[in-house]
Amino acid sequence: MNLYEQVGYFCDRAFEKINLKESHKSILKNCYRELDVQIVIHGQDGEPKEYRGFRIQHNGARGPYKGGIRYHQMVDINEVRALASLMTWKNAIVDVPFGGAKGGIRVDPTKLTKKELETLTRSFVRKIDMALGTHRDIPAPDLNTNPQVMAWIMDEYGRKHGHTPAIVTGKPLELGGSKGRISATGLGVFIITKEICSKLEIPLQTSKAIVQGFGNVGSYTAEFLYRAGVKVIAIQDAYATLHNDSGIDVVKLVKYLKETGGIKGFKGAEEINSKDFFSVKSTIVIPAALENVITKEIAKKLDCKIVVEAANGPTTMEADSILNEKGVVVIPDILANAGGVTCSYFEWTQNLTEYYWDEEKVNEELRKIMVRAFSEVYELSKKEKVTIRDAAFLLAVKRVNTAMQLRGAF
Ligand code: NAD
């Protein structure tokens, strides 16, 4: 099953619980609007180069569409649909007033110069302009896009519509970005990990964690865990896998990452074969890199108590069933990594009100929302006797369904 089919499968399970009509199911599952555009830019050699760009809006019943834009050579329309749908459910779980969207350009950004990336981004914005708006659709960063790309999006949109910081989130601080945005997803993952450990009566101080991915989400998550007393015993990025059963000094590793751009060569741990990463026995497993990395083979050998999905879609469906059978508690992506979009909501609010918060307020508001969302999902899972993933989808589907009914769509 691809990610789109997997998301559909979990939606179906939630639909069954609330006895939705067939026609309503299909409306909730399918996307509202799909833009699939041709982008042509001229390379340094003067030759035209063609790219495909997508912006897909899944459901806007609860508010303007919201979701990131990714640049990757593997971007395909079904993946964007799935990610747009996940955004609808994620925003409903944390109860921020947004619908769900996602976008992407099929491009390997490492092959483009900075100028070409800017031209590509600006051209894409012009092509999807009619679907954007501060109360219609608000993009954000995702894989291989960053505050600079968001700044180009804001600037290009502003050429036609006037200065509009609230059109995009994840902007540089100097252009109306929010304090705390850079660490928000990792902080959210940490808060959720802390909450589940407390429910399961697992003390953080005696826990061990392994973290796959040491980019934005993985590095902040690992650092928050480390500072809370968790022993982070294995860390993997695209180029190296580090292991130290006494615990890696994550603060030093973050410093090393900033100096070298990776974790390879770090002296405070032993480098092991990448294939052995998921065999390291731990309490908490944090996949914070790619989709579909926890396959059924990996699920069978994982020796842990909790998996917290910091990445989007890291566990395949078969693996999810195996983990459930083994009694491993899985915290789904739509809850675990919702800290990023929650902070994006704060950024949008600050842009619209033109009043900016300090980092303490951002982090405290984030904590309140993540703790509330966790508690609502956890209680529902107990009440309905379902997994936390099923409870998360159920809560989200109920909220979106209610909004559709109140609007008169159903
Ligand atoms: P990033 O690009 O900053 O970091 C990705 C990390 O994964 C890097 O350390 C990279 O080396 C590592 N990686 C890549 N390929 C790997 C491989 N084959 N094996 C092991 N490690 C590998 O990305 P990010 O922003 O940290 O996002 C990570 C995940 O979290 C993605 O699934 C993303 O969609 C999701 N996510 C991110 C945010 C956010 O705010 N950044 C919010 C929600 C979800």
Image (spheres, rainbow, N blue to C red):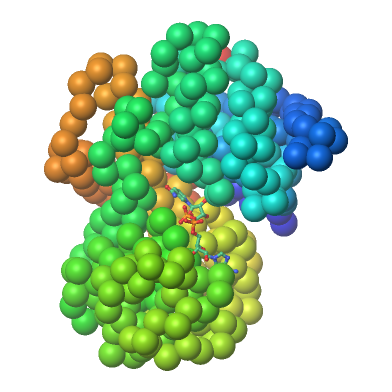
x 35%, y 28%: residue: 175
Along the line of sight, the residue nearer the viewer: 405 or 197? 197
x 45%, y 48%: residue: 334
Does 130 sit above or below residue 4? above
Q: Is residue 74 left or right of residue 314?
A: right
User: Could you tell me residue 176's position as x and y percent?
Assistant: 32, 27
The N terminus appears in which quarter of the rendering?
bottom right
Location of residue 269 by image quarter: bottom left
In the picture as drawn, the residue positioned furthest to the right comes out as 47
Along the line of sight, the residue nearer the viewer: 226 or 95? 226
Tell how many labels: 0
Q: Is residue 53 visible?
A: yes
x 49%, y 15%: residue: 158
Does 74 sit above or below residue 325? above
Q: Is residue 3 left or right of residue 185?
A: right
User: Could you tell me residue 33's position as x and y percent?
Assistant: 66, 23
In the picture as drawn, the residue positioned furthest to the top comes out as 161
The C terminus appears in which quarter of the rendering?
top right
User: Could you tell me residue 325's position as x and y percent?
Assistant: 51, 73
x 27%, y 24%: residue: 350
Q: Is residue 56 visible?
A: no
User: Could you tell me residue 117's position as x and y percent?
Assistant: 63, 38
